[in-house]
Structure formats: structure tokens, C-alpha cells
């Protein structure tokens, strides 16, 4: 898994998920950590592909945060356009719906714990997938 010491460097917040710490965690916590790790790997890989095509993402962008968001979104749109033009089949890509997840704002550590617990329960319920149980 991609959990590590650097996870402790970031405070648990409602918009920043961290794995459950320690070795003696519940099955729900173990599944959550596994699913979070898979999501991190997927995002890291996707961003790597995007950054290699659009080199502006290799260095800090010297712009206001709002404009940086626009630059990043433009890179994503251009990337998808190029993939579609080059014949990449989007229907074969694995997709997941997050429609059942409620939007949450930024908040305190206790609210971050609540959000992490919410996702942990969600992964064991409506969003459970067969492969997640291999970590138990």
C-alpha cells in the first residue's frame, strides 16, 4: 500500500483523507486503507500520464489558484480530446459512480474523522467490490 510516514505530515481534514493508523485496525479500517491506497495509485498514475503530455504540470504553476484550476482542467480536456482523436476507447475504461456520496466541506479534525468513517462504511456497503476483501 502507499501509506507511509508522510501521511502523518498532513492533518486529517474533511477534504484530505488519511489512512487509519496503526497495525491493530478493524476489517473496515483495513478495507478503507486498501481502497484509499488504490485510489492514490490511480490518481498518481493518471496525473503522471497527464503531466508527461502537458509539461506545464512538471513545475509549480506561477498563477493564482483559481487560474491554476483552469489550466489543470484545460490540460484534462485537451488530454481527453487527444486520446479520443487517437482512437482510445473510453467505453473500455473502468468507471465508478460517486453519486451516492454526499458533498462535504472543509472542517476540523473531528469532522475529518467523520468523513473517513463515512467512506469506510460506504466501501463496506453500497460501494463494496469483491477484490477489496483480499486484504482481510
Image: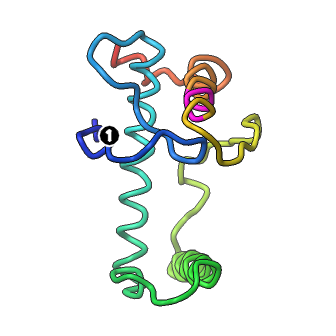
**Nearer-the-camera pick, 128 or 108:** 108
> Residue 32 location in percent, x, y?
46, 26
Name which residue lies at 45% across and 85% down: 61
Direction left: furthest residue: 5
Which quadrant of the figure contains the N terminus?
top left
Name the side, left or right, on which 23 lies relative to 20: left
User: Of helix, strand and loop, which one carries label 1?
Assistant: helix
> Residue 20 location in percent, x, y?
40, 25
Magenta stretch: dominant secondary structure: helix
Name the side, left or right, on which 128 lies relative to 33: right
**Nearer-the-camera pick, 89 or 12:** 12
Color scheme of the displayed model: rainbow
**Magenta span of residues:** 112-116
Which quadrant of the figure contains the C terminus?
top left
The quadrant holding residue 116 is: top right
Relative vertical location of residue 15 with respect to residue 119 in this rendering, above or below: below
Residue that numbered label 1 is attached to:
8
> Does residue 29 appear in the picture of this structure?
yes
The quadrant holding residue 127 is: top right
Q: How crowded is mark 1: few (under 14 residues within 10 Å), some or many (20 or more)?
A: few
Name which residue lies at 34% across and 80% down: 58
Name which residue lies at 42% across and 62% down: 46
Name which residue lies at 58% across and 62% down: 90
> Does residue 85 appear in the picture of this structure?
no
Q: Does the magenta stretch include residue 63?
A: no
Count of residue discs: 1
**Nearer-the-camera pick, 24 or 90:** 24
**Nearer-the-camera pick, 121 or 85:** 121
> Residue 70 location in percent, x, y?
63, 81
Relative vertical location of residue 54 with respect to residue 117 in this rendering, above or below: below
Amino acid at each position: 500500500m502507499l501509506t507511509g510516514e508522510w501521511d502523518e505530515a498532513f492533518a486529517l481534514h474533511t477534504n484530505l483523507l488519511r489512512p487509519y493508523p496503526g497495525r491493530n485496525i478493524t476489517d473496515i479500517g483495513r478495507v478503507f486503507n486498501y481502497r484509499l491506497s488504490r485510489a492514490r495509485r490511480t490518481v498518481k498514475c493518471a496525473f503522471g500520464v497527464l503531466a508527461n503530455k502537458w509539461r506545464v504540470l512538471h513545475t509549480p504553476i506561477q498563477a493564482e489558484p483559481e487560474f491554476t484550476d483552469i489550466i489543470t482542467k484545460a490540460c484534462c480536456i485537451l488530454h481527453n480530446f487527444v486520446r479520443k482523436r487517437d482512437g482510445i476507447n473510453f467505453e473500455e475504461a473502468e468507471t465508478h459512480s460517486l453519486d451516492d456520496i454526499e458533498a462535504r466541506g472543509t472542517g476540523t479534525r473531528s469532522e475529518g474523522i467523520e468523513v473517513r468513517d463515512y467512506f469506510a462504511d460506504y466501501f463496506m456497503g453500497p460501494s463494496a467490490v469483491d477484490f477489496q476483501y483480499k486484504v482481510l
